[in-house]
Amino acid sequence: MSEAEKQPEVFKGLVGVYADVSAVSKVMPETNSLTYRGYAVQDLAENCSFEEVSYLLWEGELPTRAQLAAFHQETASQREISPTLHRVIREFPHDAHPMDAIRTAVSFMGLEDPEAGDVSHAAQYRKAKRLFAKIPTCIGATYRATKGLPAVTPNPAHSFAENVFNLVQGRVPEPEVLKAFDVSMILYAEHTFNASTYTARLVTSTGADMHGAITAGIAALKGPLHGGANEAVMHMLKEIGDPKIAREWLQSRFDHRALVMGFGHRVYKSGDSRVPTMKKYAEKMAEVVQDRTWMEISRILADEMLTKKNIHPNLDFPAGPAYHLMGFEIPLFTPLFVASRVTGWSAHVLEQQADNRLIRPLSWYIGLEQRPMPSLTARG
């Protein structure tokens, strides 16, 4: 039997492979609902703040009022970044993608962290909360540096959502906008063993610390087939520009077998359970700013994709225009995803560390058999 005939089944992309167990989240097949620690994410989005959901992901249960107040006080008091990091951020190339800037800032915070060498569970958890607190400050400082604006000092009295808007835009918007943003943070916070989460767990399996794992997660999230898709969606909508040509534009994509961003998902086959909630709040944002252009284009694309291809939109599809309507520039969409997903990543880091085994898969070699080394003369 030849070597080719002996080849084991290879699962490209690890499709269908269970790499470990997890108690953090699951897509429940009976209801097609993504759940965090057993709670349907759509229920959490409607009834909880992002801070409550972050606490849930880390602690396993929703906080009491007292626990939530203590959590807010602890994290809000740690939002500011060092003067050194502020100087470093101002030296970043102004044309660099914000995801590269945030990845670098997180790595730098690992250098400064007072517990950099401590990978105990308690220290890793404290690092997770510091990253939760400081990443929005890095996002705001990076964005404002590219505009020649001074960084905004975090206000510990602000909620998470209020803080993000103030750090980036220098203002706190209407409650309807804050709620829509909070919902997006909750929906983006966690999603089982996605590419960036698996990356963070893999790095953790080597004994690396929290900052190393999160830096790697950010690098994985940047790709347009993962977190960067929300940016690609908005670029697509702006390319179309007018609802009147949406069907024609989409047919052209079909004709050229081109990718349509924001559609399809490896886990969901009957539609992403997060989409209806995010779409609801994107529609609310369109009402707030009195501009339905992007939602109308989105409606046409979603209808056509379902009718002609039987493909449903994923969370990035309504999140892209929602962030745009909130006043965020497109390159900030995926960094905002980071500000949310750091909670899910770190929950998985802590879980991986609690029952760790080095992640080291095999590859099936298809190259040349071992052969003799030719001399330099023989090589001509």
Image (cartoon, rainbow, N blue to C red):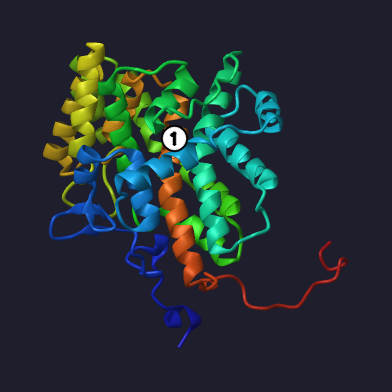
Q: Quadrant of residue 198?
A: bottom left
Side of 104 relative to 374 (left or right)? left
Image quadrant containing the N terminus: bottom left
Q: Which residue is mark 1?
A: 334
Residue 207 visible within the image: yes
Q: Which residue is located at x 54 percent, y 44 percent?
A: 130
Q: Secondary structure at mark 1?
A: helix
Q: Is residue 31 above or below residue 339?
A: below
Q: Is residue 260 visible?
A: no
- Of all residues shown, which one is farthest toward the top? 290
Which x, y percent locates residue 200? 50, 56
**Rendered view: 25 above or below 240:** below
Quadrant for residue 49, please give it. Answer: top left
Where residue 24 sits in the image (x, y, percent)?
Answer: 34, 59
Number of callouts? 1
- Residue 283 locus on image (x, y percent): 19, 24
Residue at x 58% of width, y 40% of height: 103
356 with respect to 375 (left or right): left
- Which residue occupies the extreme bottom position in the image? 1
The front one of 153 and 322 is 153
Q: Is residue 311 above or below residue 119?
A: above
Q: Nearer the viewer, residue 219 or 52?
A: 52
Measured from the top left, where is residue 308 in percent x and y? 14, 38
